[in-house]
Amino acid sequence: MGTDIFLLNISGQDKPGLTSSLTSVLAEYDAKILDIGQANIHDTLSLGMMFEIKSGKKSAAVLKDLLFKAYELGIAAKFTPISLENYEHWVSMQGKDRYIVTILGEKLKAQQISKVTQVISEKNLNIDSIKRLTGRTSLIKEEEYPRASIQLSIRGKLNDKSEFTSRFMEISQELDVDIAFQEDSMFRRNRRLVCFDMDSTLIQTEVIDELAERAGVGNEVKAITESAMQGEIDFQESFKKRMKLLEGLSEEVLKDIAENLPITKGARRLIDTLHNYGYKTAILSGGFTYFGKYLQEKLDIDFVFANELEIKDGVLTGGYIGDIVDGNKKAEYLQLLADNMGIDIEQTIAVGDGANDLQMLNLAGLGIAFHAKPKVKDSAQSSISSIGLDGVLYLLGYHDRHIDLV
């Protein structure tokens, strides 16, 4: 005697003991559970179970008893027969590549999700699961910091990843939403090091511009900074030019600026969570160690690599000590930290906004352009422009309940 395969779909009001009651019926008939999955939206349950049962009397009896049990529980039950051929085709899909698509925004609209899932469908990729990562939103109480994120787990063969991600970039720009695409590999689940640019990433300012304002050369320095961040001039050349303009500035000014640095929204939530889950953090900055060390203490950062100002008799000389930390140096420090920790470079994350961050963003296992310049956003693996720095946690797959418990 052969076997039958059925997909049981349950929908209705969720209640304690529901899954236990249904599986107890299947247990009485010695059914084998081949797959099971459940989702719960606003206390409304959607439960699916695929099971195998001996053909004949058992098969007919278990369906009848399941229908009766569903009636007792006040839920709807639907059965779909699955052919052996279809089942084996489904099993064969296990070997396909797996990817994660994360959608981020202050609020998510149907149009944004529709466009993203349309691209997935056009590439003949299958969505295995959709998970909301952010908490429930009140329609009455105004959110002080609105944010929404969902994660799609997809599967299939993707021939041209760059064309796929470029489509997401177009949607992102058109509909003001962040869309991150990652391979669902063992490295993604085992990241260990997160490195941050400092200026305009961890803090909402360019410190060298603040110093320039105090030195009375604000416009000149801002113009050079912007040109460097856009990648129009060499970072080392721009750094030397800006340093010369700061000659004679009092060290007291540095202290005042450090004590009033504007920390980026979500930074503390992100770093506290990372540390609670065992990550190491680092600042890799083209800025200055004076401010990096201040942030290190304030935010509990593990490592700091930045430029060291030369100070004599309490004033800036317009010079610096040691090597200039440019884009190449940031990437070197990222690799050095990974080597010292004994981890693969794929287990690292880099976050930055400027052209001098691109080398480390492209070297890291996950490079994230944060509220970045257009050139950087176009070149990075992933970007966050719609919410704060804690958006990084959603790209790692954390749900708000995992974050807010720590």
Image (cartoon, grey):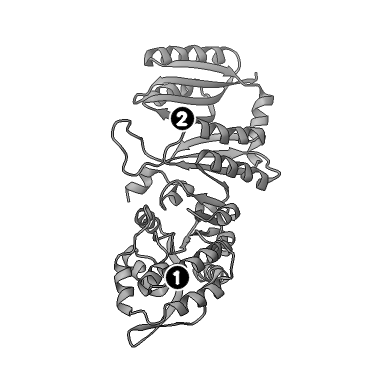
User: Label 2 to label 1, Cα distance in Å?
Assistant: 49 Å
> What amino acid is found at the position of numbered circle 1 in the picture?
Gly
> What amino acid is found at the position of numbered circle 2 in the picture?
Gln
Q: Quadrant of residue 326?
A: bottom right
State whether residue 294 is above or below residue 60.
below
Q: Residue at label 2? A: 38
Query: Seen in the image, is 372 located left or right of residue 211?
Result: right
Mark 1 packing: few (<14 Cα in 10 Å), some, or many (20+)? many
Q: How many circles with numbers are drawn on the protein?
A: 2
Any part of residue 344 in sight = no
Locate residue 387, reporting x and y percent: 42, 47
What mark, if any, has residue 287 been given in the picture? 1
Q: Secondary structure at mark 1?
A: strand
The residue drawn where x is 49% and y is 66% is 223
Q: Front-most of 4 and 293? A: 293
State whether residue 226 is above or below residue 71.
below
The residue drawn where x is 56% and y is 15% is 59
Locate residue 108, reporting x and y percent: 45, 36
The residue drawn where x is 45% and y is 51% is 392
Specify the farthest residue to the right.
159
Q: Earlier in the sequence, mark 2 or mark 1?
A: 2
